[in-house]
Image (cartoon, rainbow, N blue to C red):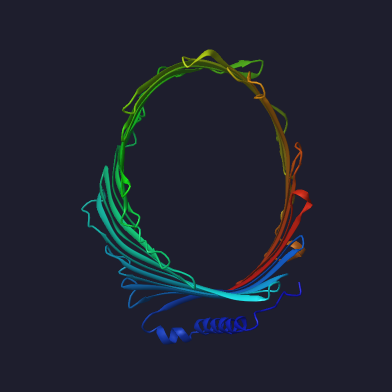
């Protein structure tokens, strides 16, 4: 803690002077000097902040301490009139010092940005944005008695021109956008540059919408002779005459050159999807088709792959309680000397019974029947293989639930369910069966002083096929919300979860049993006026979790305390966080921040 206000000795001192100068300049700007100088030609609106940050971290025998100062100035304005040219600028300067037991480092950072928009409210606005950041780090190691420094800069430059067509009606319009962007990274060891450009064209002819876009991006680095190039082009179309019918069409192509001149890849695809969901009819239809092709040309040979995928789905409401559905799909792949074709068809019928009242309980049941068929054929030029699988299945379940109100503001609910399933496939001679049971109970009580919630769920599911399995799950939780007074409240949750899974196999040594138990607790406290101080609030959160079953049970505690105080344009915050992980290893973090805005 003795390092609390220690600043860099040489460069850090100089940077601190620069930082103080920046703050002084910002105060001068807000005092009206800048307005007097530029206000006649370019009215400005200035804002910004000055911030001080301190953090201290310790875990075991390691500790670190960081002190940082940052200052930011933002300016927005216009030239002549706001509709002619608008401007924006930002400048951020910062210095920081980090000390550990064996090393220290000083960091100086600066960043600035400039934005310019010509005719911002017209149909043809033009914008220019430029940003530059500079970071320098000086480090020293007490263990090796060595020092070093690193320096890197990042600059970004973006141009964008838009044009919005004049439409005779609100349902007709178009917009064109052209853009260019470049990013430069420069450090002591390497330098890289990336460049991208493109355009977007959108036209709206209700109920149609069209979008055409294309872009090109490239990059290069000083330590590599490669200059990869990527071109992307796409066309999209949507047709939505109303909420019942819709269609989307998309065509894209991507061309990638790895920069060596020996390999080039092209990926293209066309897709179309539609839906028809009439509001007052019992039928819904949806479907789609996608065609894709990829080709790679290289010195080692050419490879080409083509694929086709289609799907169609139909659902129909026979009655208010019965629904049916059917779907089909087809897919083909051509990969050089290997071709494959796969098809599938499915059909299902579901029935939900009416809810019945039995001795105060609400009861209903469900039934589902399904059937599917899939065929796959593969030809590699030497031999041909084909498989066909048919599957039928049935699901039957029922459920009963009830709610009681034992008192004012309290309720208890009970939910019981049971479901069974059976399926038969030509791929497996054995009938697969499954059965599951579930039970849940919840309780809640509300009053003017808060609320309490309780929940318990138990489930058991078993499957019987070539490999039998069992799974049981139990979860219990209780939560309490307490309103202490109009300024403070307390909340807490405690939960317990246990799961057991057992797999039985005829293969010796393949059976297994797994068990997991987990407990969790979460408590929080909040006060909006601690010690009677206005604009101050305090929050404390304690979270604990423990693995109760295993060779190495793990325990985790996390205690986070935060105080925030605001007075006018001054905002301060202080936090203390303690984390204890497995093995009793604890880490502590102290963080303080003060920000003065103007």
Is 39 placed above or below 362 here? Answer: below
Residue 223 x %, y %: 43, 66
- Give x and y (percent) for residue 461: 63, 22
Left or right, 430 with respect to 372, comes to right
How many numbered tags mark residues here? 0
Towards the viewer: 100 or 450: 100
For the N terminus, the image quarter is bottom right
User: Left of 228 or right of it: where is 509?
Assistant: right
- Residue at point 79%, 51% (across, down): 584
Q: Dividing the picture into quarters, in which one does residue 95 lie?
A: bottom right
- Residue 119: percent from the left, percent from the top? 30, 69
Front-most of residues 542 and 472: 472
Question: In screen coordinates, is 245 left or right of 98?
Answer: left
The image quadrant of residue 527 is: bottom right
User: Which residue occupies the foreground of this view, 449 or 566?
Assistant: 566
Where is the C terminus found, in terms of image quarters? bottom right
Report the front residue among 406 and 459. Answer: 459
Can you say whether 460 is above or below 569 in the image? above
Depicted 102 relative to depicted 320: above or below: below
Q: Is residue 4 above or below residue 481?
A: below
Rendered location of residue 243, percent (x, y): 34, 36
Residue 262 found in image quarter: bottom left
Furthest-right residue in view? 584
The answer to whether any part of residue 253 appears in the image is: yes
Query: Is residue 72 in view from this perspective?
Result: no
């Amino acid at each position: 803690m003795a390092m609390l206000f220690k600043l860099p000795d040489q460069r850090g001192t100089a940077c601190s002077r620069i930082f103080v100068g920046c703050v002084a300049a910002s105060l001068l700007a807000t005092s009206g000097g800048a307005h007097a100088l530029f206000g006649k030609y370019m009215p400005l609106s200035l804002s910004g902040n000055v911030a001080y940050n301190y953090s201290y971290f310790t875990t075991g025998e390691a500790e670190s301490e960081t002190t940082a100062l940052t200052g930011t100035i933002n300016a927005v304005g216009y030239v002549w009139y706001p509709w002619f040219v608008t401007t924006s600028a930002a400048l951020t300067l910062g210095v920081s010092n980090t000390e550990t037991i064996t090393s220290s480092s000083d960091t100086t950072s600066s960043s600035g940005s400039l934005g310019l928009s010509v005719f911002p409210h017209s149909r043809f606005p033009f914008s220019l944005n430029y940003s530059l950041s500079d970071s320098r780090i000086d480090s020293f190691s007490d263990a090796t008695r060595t020092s070093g420094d690193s320096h890197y800069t990042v600059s970004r430059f973006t141009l964008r021109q838009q044009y919005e067509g004049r439409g005779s009606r609100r349902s007709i319009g178009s917009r064109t956008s052209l853009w260019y962007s470049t990013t430069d990274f420069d450090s002591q060891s390497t330098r890289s540059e990336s460049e991208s450009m493109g355009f977007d064209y959108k036209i709206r002819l209700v109920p149609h919408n069209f979008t055409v876009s294309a872009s090109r991006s490239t990059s290069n680095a000083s330590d590599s002779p490669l200059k990869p190039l990527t071109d992307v082009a796409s066309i999209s179309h949507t047709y939505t005459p109303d909420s019942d019918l819709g269609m989307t069409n998309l065509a894209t192509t991507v061309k990638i050159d790895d920069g060596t001149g020996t390999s080039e890849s092209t990926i293209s695809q066309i897709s179309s999807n539609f839906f028809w969901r009439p509001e007052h009819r019992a039928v819904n239809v949806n479907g789609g088709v996608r065609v894709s092709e990829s080709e790679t040309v290289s010195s080692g040979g050419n490879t080409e792959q083509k694929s086709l995928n289609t799907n169609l789905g139909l659902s129909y409401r026979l009655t208010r309680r019965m629904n049916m559905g059917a779907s089909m799909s087809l897919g083909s792949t051509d990969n050089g000397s290997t071709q494959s074709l796969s098809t599938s068809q499915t059909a299902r019928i579901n029935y939900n019974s009416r809810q019945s009242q039995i001795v105060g309980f609400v009861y209903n049941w469900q039934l589902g029947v399904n059937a599917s068929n899939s065929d796959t054929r593969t030809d590699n030029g030497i031999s041909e293989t084909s498989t066909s699988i048919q599957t039928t299945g049935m699901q039957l379940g029922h459920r009963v639930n009830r709610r009681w109100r034992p008192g004012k503001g309290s309720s208890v609910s009970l939910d019981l369910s049971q479901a069974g399933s059976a399926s038969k496939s030509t791929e497996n001679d054995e009938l697969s069966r499954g059965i599951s049971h579930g039970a849940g109970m919840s309780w809640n009580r509300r009053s003017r002083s808060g609320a309490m919630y309780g929940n318990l769920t138990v489930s058991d599911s078993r499957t019987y096929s070539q490999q039998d399995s069992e799974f049981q799950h139990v979860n219990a939780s209780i939560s309490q919300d307490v309103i202490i007074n109009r300024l403070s409240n307390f909340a807490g949750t405690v939960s317990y979860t246990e799961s057991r899974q057992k797999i039985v196999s005829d293969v010796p040594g393949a059976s297994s049993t797994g068990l997991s138990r987990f407990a969790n607790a979460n408590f929080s406290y909040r006060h909006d006026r601690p010690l009677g101080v206005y604009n101050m609030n305090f929050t404390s959160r304690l979270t604990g979790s423990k693995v109760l079953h295993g060779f190495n049970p793990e325990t985790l505690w996390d205690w986070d305390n935060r105080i925030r105080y605001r007075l006018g344009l001054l905002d301060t915050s202080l936090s203390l966080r303690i984390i204890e992980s497995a093995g009793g290893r604890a880490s502590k973090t102290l963080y303080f921040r003060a920000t003065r805005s103007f």
